[in-house]
Amino acid sequence: MTLKGSGSDVTSSFITAAAADPNGISTAASISGAANLTIGGALASGGSVTMDSPRNVTILSAGDDSGITFTVTGTDESSAAQTEVITGVDSTTATGTKFFKTVTQIATSGSSAGNVSAGSGTSCCGVISAARCRLRGIYVVNGSGAATIVFREGSGTGTIVMQFATVAGASTNSYPDVPDDGLLFKNGGYVTFTAVTDLTAMTTFFS
């Protein structure tokens, strides 16, 4: 969510992420042959998923799916089209590494050994602005654990511009200073963190 104050060039973005949902994209079902998972979990609407914050995708297998792959299609944290191939695992969870803003399809390369479900992971990427911006301030509602949130240039895997250490204390607040003229992100600003434990919510102020 982006809000702009009247008479000011400073804009705010609100970043938050719910707990991971292991079957929020696709609920447990057995797959026969190369096919698409049904995108109909609690996070889905109209056959696709839009994440609260861009985050990774997980695949939970009830059987040994180490011989097949799952190709996730959607958009990344900058709204650009992307895919990720996740190799299945044996009776546990396979974890993707790319950040997905939306998921529109998950295709298998073959039959599953048992039920398979797909969901949202805990690795998140909050978007300050996808365009050039200058960070002016941040307000953080801490999570359950002390952690380091990372501010990056250009994407969720871009160059680190700043790091900020949160404190353990769910719903406590931190309002650190951003000195001088702020921090410039020439190709957009992004924040990477782990959902719930690293922070509950964050508001960034930028121009």
Image (cartoon, grey):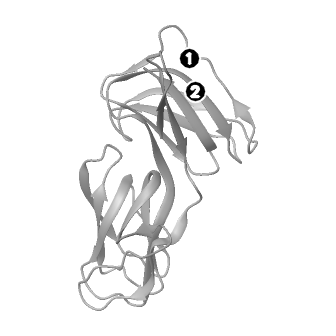
Is residue 98 something that shows in the picture? no
Residue 46 or residue 83, whichever sits in front: 46
Determine whether, in the image, residue 189 is placed left or right of residue 174.
left
Instruction: Locate residue 141: give its quadrant.
Output: top right
In primary-sequence order, the first of circles 2 and 1 is 2
Residue 7 or residue 194, whichever sits in front: 7
Q: Are marks 2 and 1 in contact (CB under 8 Å)?
A: yes
Position of the C terminus by quadrant: top left
Secondary structure state at the residue bearing disc 1 = loop
Residue 1 or residue 121, whichever sits in front: 1
**Please, which residue is most extreme toward the front here?**
6
Residue type marked 1 = Val
Q: Is residue 117 above or below residue 63?
A: above
Instruction: Give the residue drawn at x 34%, y 38%.
Output: 155
Is residue 130 something that shows in the picture? yes
Disc 2 versus disc 1: distance between alpha carbons? 8 Å
Residue 162 picture location, percent across and down: 49, 25
Residue 176 picture location, percent across and down: 64, 22
Q: Which residue is mark 1?
A: 178
Residue type marked 2 = Ile
Q: Which residue is mark 2?
A: 138
**Please, which residue is most extreme toward the top here?**
180
Determine whether, in the image, residue 114 is placed left or right of residue 109.
right
